[in-house]
C-alpha cells in the first residue's frame, strides 16, 4: 500500500514545441504541457485523464526520459532527472526506477523474438545472470503476468492482444522498477480482456509494491485502478484529487463534461433505420 513519501514529484512541468506556422512562413510555439505538478506516492496509483492532445502522454514521456522539458523538474526516487544530459549509465539507472507500457503491444514487441528471448534481452540489459538463473527469471516473469510455459517459445503474432500486453508488462518488470507508467495500456483490448489486465496490474501493485501512473481517457478504468486522478485539458491540470471524490463530485466544467459523456447503465447506441 502507498506510504507518505512521494516516489515521483513533478514540479511545474512545461513543454513547448517549435512548429511551422500553419499557412504562413516561419514558426510558432505550441505549448503541449503548461505548469503541471503532482506526486505519485511509493506504491500508489495515480491517473492522468483527458482528451487527445491534452498533454498527458507528453508528461509520461518526459518522466521516462523520452522527451526533454522546457521548464520544471522531475524528481524520481529522490533524484532530479531534468536539466542535465542523460548519459547511457544515467538512462540505465532511470530505467531501473521507471518503465513504460504503451498502448499497442504488437508494435512495441520485436516480431522476430520469442517471448523468452524478449524477456531474456530485457533482463540482460540490467543484470548479468548465469544461464540457468536467467532461464528461471524468465519463467518467473512469465508467471507473474499470468503466462504459461508454452508462451515462452511463442512469437508475438501467435499471441492474443491480451497476451501480448502481458508480455509487454513482464518486459517492463524485468528491470524491477519502482514505477510503471501505462500509456493507454488497455485501450486497444476488448472489455473482458481489459478487466483481466487491470486486475493483473492491481495484483502487481499490491504484491510487488510497484507504483502506477495510468494515462487514460477511460474514466471507468481510472475508477477501477487508481487512488488519485489529474484531469488535463490543453496542457494544464484543471482538477485533481482523490479519484472517488473527483469522479463522483467534479468541480470543473470540463471534468463534468467528461463524466457526462460516459454512457450509463442501460445505454444503447442510437440506430438509424432506413426504409426500403
Image (tube, grey):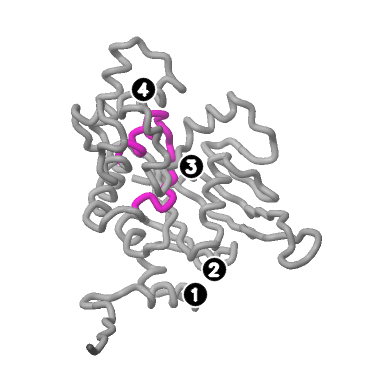
SS class of the residue under badge 2? strand
State how far apart marks 3 and 2 are (Cα). Answer: 23 Å
Residue 254: numbered disc:
1
The answer to whether residue 240 shows anywhere in this view is: no
Q: Nearer the viewer, mark 2 or mark 1?
A: 1
Q: Is residue 98 rendered to the left or right of residue 120?
A: right
Residues at marks 2 and 1 touching, judged by CB atoms closer than 8 Å:
yes
| Badge 3 density bin: few <14, some 14–19, many ≥20, Cα 10 Å | many
What residue is disc 2 on? 238
Specify the quadrant of the image occupied by residue 215: bottom left
| Badge 1 density bin: few <14, some 14–19, many ≥20, Cα 10 Å | some
State how far apart marks 1 and 3 are (Cα). Answer: 29 Å
Whether 173 is among the magenta residues is yes
Residue 68: numbered disc:
none
Q: Is residue 151 rendered to the left or right of residue 248?
A: left
Report the residue at 53% width, 40% height from top. Answer: 64
Task: Give percent across and percent down for residue 57.
Answer: 51, 53
State how far apart marks 2 and 1 are (Cα). Answer: 8 Å
Q: Is residue 55 rendered to the left or right of residue 165?
A: right
Upstream in sequence: badge 4 or badge 1: 4
Residues at marks 2 and 4 touching, judged by CB atoms closer than 8 Å:
no
Region rendered in magenta: 166-186
State how far apart marks 4 and 1 are (Cα). Answer: 45 Å
Upstream in sequence: badge 1 or badge 3: 3
What residue is disc 3 on? 7
Q: Nearer the viewer, mark 4 or mark 1?
A: 4
Report the residue at 55% width, 64% height from top. Answer: 237
Amino acid at each position: 500500500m502507498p506510504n507518505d513519501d512521494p516516489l515521483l514529484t513533478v514540479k511545474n512541468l512545461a513543454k513547448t514545441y517549435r512548429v511551422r506556422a500553419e499557412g504562413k512562413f516561419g514558426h510558432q510555439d505550441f505549448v503541449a504541457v503548461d505548469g503541471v505538478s503532482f506526486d505519485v506516492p511509493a506504491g500508489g496509483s495515480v491517473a492522468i485523464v483527458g482528451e487527445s492532445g491534452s498533454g498527458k502522454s507528453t508528461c509520461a514521456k518526459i518522466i521516462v526520459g523520452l522527451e526533454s522539458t522546457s521548464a520544471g523538474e522531475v524528481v524520481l526516487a529522490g533524484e532530479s532527472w531534468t536539466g542535465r544530459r542523460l548519459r547511457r549509465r544515467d538512462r540505465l539507472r532511470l530505467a531501473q526506477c521507471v518503465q513504460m507500457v504503451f498502448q499497442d503491444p504488437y508494435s512495441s514487441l520485436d516480431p522476430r523474438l520469442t517471448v523468452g528471448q524478449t524477456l531474456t534481452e530485457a533482463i540482460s540489459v540490467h543484470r548479468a545472470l548465469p544461464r540457468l538463473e536467467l532461464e528461471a527469471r524468465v519463467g518467473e516473469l512469465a508467471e507473474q503476468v499470468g503466462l504459461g510455459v508454452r508462451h515462452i517459445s511463442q512469437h508475438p503474432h501467435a499471441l492474443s492482444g491480451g497476451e501480448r500486453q502481458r508480455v509487454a508488462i513482464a518486459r517492463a518488470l524485468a528491470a524491477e522498477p519502482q514505477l510503471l507508467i501505462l500509456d493507454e495500456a488497455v485501450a486497444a483490448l476488448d472489455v473482458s480482456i481489459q478487466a483481466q489486465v487491470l486486475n493483473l496490474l492491481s495484483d502487481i501493485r499490491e504484491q510487488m509494491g510497484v507504483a502506477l501512473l495510468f494515462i487514460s481517457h477511460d474514466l471507468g478504468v481510472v475508477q477501477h485502478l487508481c487512488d488519485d486522478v489529474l484531469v488535463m485539458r490543453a496542457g494544464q491540470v484543471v482538477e485533481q484529487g482523490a479519484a472517488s471524490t473527483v469522479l463522483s463530485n467534479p468541480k470543473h466544467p470540463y471534468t463534468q463534461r467528461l463524466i457526462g459523456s460516459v454512457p450509463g447503465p442501460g445505454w444503447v447506441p442510437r440506430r438509424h433505420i432506413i426504409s426500403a
